[in-house]
Image (tube, rainbow, N blue to C red):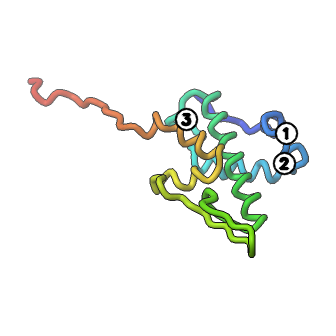
Amino acid sequence: MGVVVFNPDTFREIYPQFVDTPNVRLDWWFAQAETLLNNTDCSIVKDLSERERLLMLLMRHLAALDERADQGGLVGRIGSATEGSVSVSADLSGVSGKAAWFAQTPWGLTYWQMTAKYRAFRYVPGGCYARR
C-alpha cells in the first residue's frame, strides 16, 4: 500500500498553465485534496496510480474554483447571460446535492465519474448464524 507523495513537477507537466505557481500554493491544493480523498493506507482507492490521478483532478478542480473566486466568485455552471448591462446567472439544477460541488468544473465532474464505482453499494457477507 502506501500514500501518494505529491510531486509539483508532475502536476506542472500535466497542467502546464501552473508552471509559475509557487509550490506553497500547489501544496495547499494537495492538502485540500487529501481532505476530500483519503490518502492513507485506509483509503478506499487502493491503486496508488489511480489515487494520484484522482488527487490531481481534485487539485485542478480546487485551482479552478480559486481562480473563479479571484474573478468575482460566481459558483455553478453558466445558466444564462445577457450583454446589455451585463447579467450572468449560475445554475446547478439537474445535479444531485453531493455532485453539485464537483459539477462546477470539468475536472470535478471527471473526478465524480471516476469515483462512481466507490459510491456504489457494497455488500460484505457476514457469517452464517445457522452453523452449530
* Quarter-of-image position of residue 38: top right
Instruction: Tell me the crowding category of disc 1: few under 14, some 14 to 19, or many 20 or more residues within 10 angstroms, Cα based.
Output: few
Classify residue 78 as left or right of residue 18.
left
Outermost residue toward the bottom? 85
Label 2: few (<14), some (14–19) or many (≥20) C-alpha neighbours in 10 Å: some
Q: Quick check: 27 left or right of 47?
A: right
Q: Position of residue 92 (x, y in %)?
A: 53, 58
Q: Amino acid at mark 2?
A: Asn
Neighbor class of circle 3 (other Cα within 10 Å; few <14, some 14-19, many 20+) is few
Q: Nearer the viewer, mark 1 or mark 2?
A: 1
Contact (Cβ within 8 Å) of mark 1 with mark 2: no
User: Which mark is nearer the camera, 3 or 2?
Assistant: 3
Q: Residue furthest top?
A: 132
Residue under label 1: 16
Q: CA distance from mark 3 to mark 2?
A: 27 Å
Residue in the image at 67% along x and 49% along y: 61
Which quadrant, please, contains the N terminus?
top right
- Indicate the amino acid at tag 3: Met
Give me the residue at 66% from left, 52% from top: 32
Instruction: Identify the secondary structure beneath mark 2.
Output: helix
**Residue type at tag 1:** Pro
Q: Position of residue 91 (x, y in %)?
A: 56, 61
Residue holding disc 3: 114
Give residue 10's position: percent from left, percent from top: 80, 34
Horizontal relation, residue 114 to residue 70: left or right: left
Q: Earlier in the sequence, mark 3 or mark 1?
A: 1
Indicate the quadrant containing the C terminus: top left, top right, bottom left or bottom right: top left
Q: Which residue is mark 2?
A: 23
Q: Residue at 49%, 36% (x, y): give it.
A: 44
